[in-house]
Structure formats: structure tokens, C-alpha cells
Amino acid sequence: MQFQTVDAIESQLMDDHFLGEEIAPGVKISRRNLVRMSALALGWLALPSALRAELKREQSGSSGERIEVVLAEVHSLARALIADSEGANEEAYLQAVIQLLARMEGPRQPWFGWDTSERKWDMDTLWYSPPVILYQLKFEPDAVIDLHDHRHYNGLIIGVEGELNVRNFDIVDPSVNQADLRRGKVPPKGAEFLIKQSAHQVLRPGKQSTLTRDRDNLHVVRAGASGATCLDLFTHFNREARSYSLEWKDEPIEKNGSGYRASWR
């Protein structure tokens, strides 16, 4: 999930630096730098050289291609996908991304650790280069990210450690007029509508769950009894892409147990 637009994310990444600031020899902060560099690279360059050397000795991912090498290929595919937004084959794109990420080195732990004290889960930005963002998430045992959508973007979750229980839903209420999930048109806030469970997976290391703009777009993520770590890759079709939370009760209204009432928070 991503509860901010791309503009909001970029604004936050800029908070610690001013335009023109030299954060490393010959490297100055500008909006163009920000868009083209990952948050990982920005954070690394901002660290004192002695600390960078120490972290380099202590932090290493598992074998595989460097994150920036693999994500450069993903970025190229994403640009082609979005260039044909109306006819985009998101399923083929996501399968290609799965194959690319399988070549990638294992993610490093955040330099300053995880902070799961407030909500029992935390996330770290591994790569930021719109339209692609790659996050690493860590969950305490039984931690939950409750029901939310993925408006104007698709997503891929890959299990890294532990187990994640992922339940997906679609908006299926026939009484909703002019809903078009592919274009981000959804029932209005305050209106109750019907959703139906469309998929249910338990993600263990190396297993994936995908969603598109109009397939399995809503989901709930719950960690197993020993917690979990995962990668979350998002591809944005426009700069308004973000998630919205839903109010719902996990009590089916139909005998087959798949239909639920929901509304936007």
C-alpha cells in the first residue's frame, strides 16, 4: 500500500535537503536528481564517508544482481507499459517483473533499523524512480495492514521471510453506476458497496502475489505467528496513484462466504 501520491513522496524526500545542496563531491540536490536517483542512493550519499565505509563492511545482500541494475530493466518495461495505458497488458508486465526480481540480490536491512513499535510493521524504500517504487516491509507477529485499494497503480508482493496471509477483493456491486477501476473511478465516499473475495494466498519466501488496476485491487495483509518480511513493488500509471483505506466487517453477507459490505474511510 502507498497512502501518498508521488508528489507527496518526493516532497518528503526533499525535506532533509535544500535545492543546490552538495551532498557528496560533485552531487547536488535538484528535482531532476531526485527523480532519477533512488532513495537508497540519496541516503547513502548523505552519510559521512567513515560511516559509509563501516556500513559497507557490515551490510551485504545475498548473491544476485545489484538492485539498481535489475530495477533499471523494470523501469524500462514500466515506461513502455504506461505509454500504452489503455491497452496495457498488466499481467504480462507483472510476470516479466517477477522474472527480473528473481535475479536481484537479497535486500539489505535498513541502515538505522526497523521501527515497528507504533503499528507493528514498518517499511523502507529500497528504490525510487517513478513510475516504479520498491519497498521492503517488516511485520511483527500477526501484524495487519487492513483493507485498502491500489488506485491508478499495480503491485507485486514477494515473500522474503516468514509468512504473509494475503486476501484480495474486487468491487462487484452491480448497483454502483459508472465504476471503472482501470481508470480509478470508484463508488463515492460515504456510499456502501459490495466487495467479493477474489484470491487468498499464504506467501512464503520466494512466493508472489500480484494485483492490477482492475483485478484483485483491494487487499488485506496479515503476518504469520513468527512475523514476516516482504518486497512490495508498485508501478504508477499517473502521479495521483495512491491507496485509500476501507471500512468493512470481516463477516460475509452471503452463504458462500465471499461477499462483504464496504465503504471508503
Image: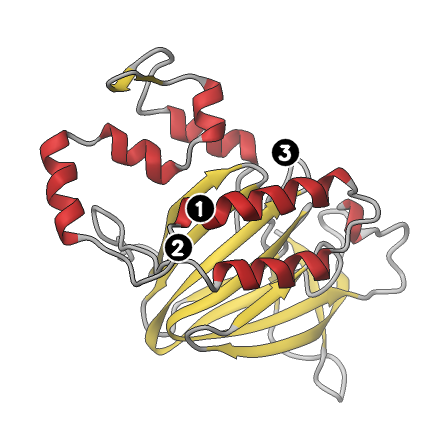
Residue at image coords 50%, 74%? 207
Q: Is residue 35 visible?
A: yes
Density class for disc 1 (Cα within 10 Å; few <14, some 14-19, many ≥20) is: few
| Marks 3 and 1, the one that precedes in the sequence | 1
Please name whichever residue, 193 or 231, is drawn nearer the observer in this view of the structure: 231
Tell me the quarter of the picture where residue 97 sits.
bottom right
| Eye-nearest disc, 3 or 1 | 1
In this figure, which residue is indicated by the disc labeled 2?
Answer: 65
Q: CA distance from mark 3 to mark 1?
A: 24 Å
Does residue 185 show up? no
Q: From what the image shows, is residue 6 above or below residue 32?
A: below
Along the line of sight, the residue nearer the viewer: 40 or 169? 40
- SS at mark 1 in the image: helix
Q: Position of residue 146 (x, y in %)?
A: 52, 63
Q: What SS does tag 2 mark? A: loop
Mark 2: amino acid: Glu
Mark 2 is surrounded, within 10 Å at the Cα level, by few (under 14), some (14 to 19) or many (20 or more) other residues, namely some
Position of residue 32 measured from the top left corner of the image (x, y, whole percent):
49, 20
Structural distance between the alpha carbons of marks 2 and 1:
7 Å
Provide the residue designation for mark 3.
Answer: 239
Dot 3: element: loop
Relative image position of residue 69 (x, y in whole percent):
44, 46
Displayed quadrant of residue 163: bottom left
In depth, the one of 225 and 42 nearer the eye is: 42
Q: Residue at x 38, y 13 (%)?
A: 19
Q: Amino acid at mark 3?
A: Arg
Q: Which residue is mark 1?
A: 69
* Amino acid identity at mark 1: Val
